Amino acid sequence: MAAQQRRRPGRGARGGKGSAGGNSDMRNKGLLLTAFAGGFIAFVIFIIDSMQHGETTLALEFENITAASWPVPCALPAATRGGNPLCQTSSCARMVWDGLVPMEDVDQLRSTADTIMNKYGGADGGTAQTQHDEYWHTHIDKVTYGSFDYTCLLYLSTYRQNFTGGRFVFEDKSYRGGDMHRVVEPKAGRVSCFTSGAENPHHVEQVASGTRYALTIAFTCDPDMAIPQPRATEATTSSAVPSNL
Ligand SMILES: *[C@@H]1O[C@H](CO)[C@@H](O)[C@H](O)[C@H]1NC(C)=O
Ligand SMILES: *[C@@H]1O[C@H](CO)[C@@H](O)[C@H](O)[C@H]1NC(C)=O
């Protein structure tokens, strides 16, 4: 009501003297036609867009997947990928495991994530500095984060149950000249791993509602980029030897 009242004087001004009912009817019809044309164009763009890429789902939220893997041709031969060549696999792939991490650990990690996010803000807690900070752009992990050779994600919340949007999408080229999107639906306790090279370009759909939690675990073949073993692990592995660590 208020918006309409505000619009009226403007329209009158644009229409000059023409305050006749017929004139405004014509304008309304014109507006309606424009709206229809706009809607039609949007619809056509939507159809063309969905024709440009096929979509298939690798892992649905309600599925229970035990170590499934999908091979993908490596973008680079193992010998040219850098780092320790023994660490580079000759084949590339994507994998999904459910139930690999016990649910109590998943819950513990999620509450830790909550604490951290409350303190420092989540993915949208601050203004993005670069495109790399915006997860919904297509990227290759090896390019975005030079040290990555294998990327693993541990999901701490579940698509549809805890958030909408936020599906993980592999983008494969050369599907009848277009793209083929292969989707992993996040699920608490689900681990998804893939080789980090150009064979696995991907993006995450923008989260539409709720909170999506994912823990990224990166493996590198470059000893210079590696971080030392955490102390707790050292203490555990050397527990047979008296130690004052
Ligand atoms: C998933 O499958 C595994 C192996 O078949 C089974 O041990 C586990 O209990 C299942 N988990 C759920 C949540 O159904
Ligand atoms: C996610 O949804 C499930 C089912 O509704 C609920 O049990 C669980 O607590 C939710 N987790 C989070 C992090 O909100």
Image (cartoon, rainbow, N blue to C red):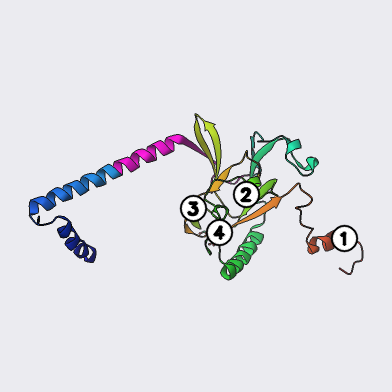
Residue at left offset 63%, top offset 66%: 112
User: Does the beta carbon at disc 1 come under 8 Å from ligand 1?
Assistant: no
**Element on which disc 1 rests:** loop
Please tell me in which quadrant of the rendered image residue 169 appears: top right
Q: Which mark is residue 238?
A: 1
Tell me which amino acid carries mark 1: Ser
**Element on which disc 3 rests:** loop
- Please tell me whether residue 44 belongs to the stretch shown in magenta: yes
Q: Which mark is residue 144?
A: 2
| Left or right of 57 on screen, residue 112 | right
Q: Along the polypeptide, which appears first: circle 2 or circle 4?
A: 4
Q: Which mark is residue 140?
A: none
Q: Along the polypeptide, which appears first: circle 1 or circle 3?
A: 3
* Marks 1 and 2, how far apart at CA: 36 Å
Q: Along the polypeptide, which appears first: circle 4 or circle 3?
A: 4
Magenta range is: 39-65
Q: Is residue 146 above or below residue 232?
A: above
Q: Nearer the viewer, mark 1 or mark 2?
A: 2
Q: Along the polypeptide, which appears first: circle 2 or circle 3?
A: 2
Tell me which amino acid carries mark 2: Thr
Q: Which residue is mark 4?
A: 129
**Element on which disc 2 rests:** helix
- Please tell me whether residue 2 belongs to the stretch shown in magenta: no
Work out which residue is located at the far front of the displayed protein and give it.
Answer: 16
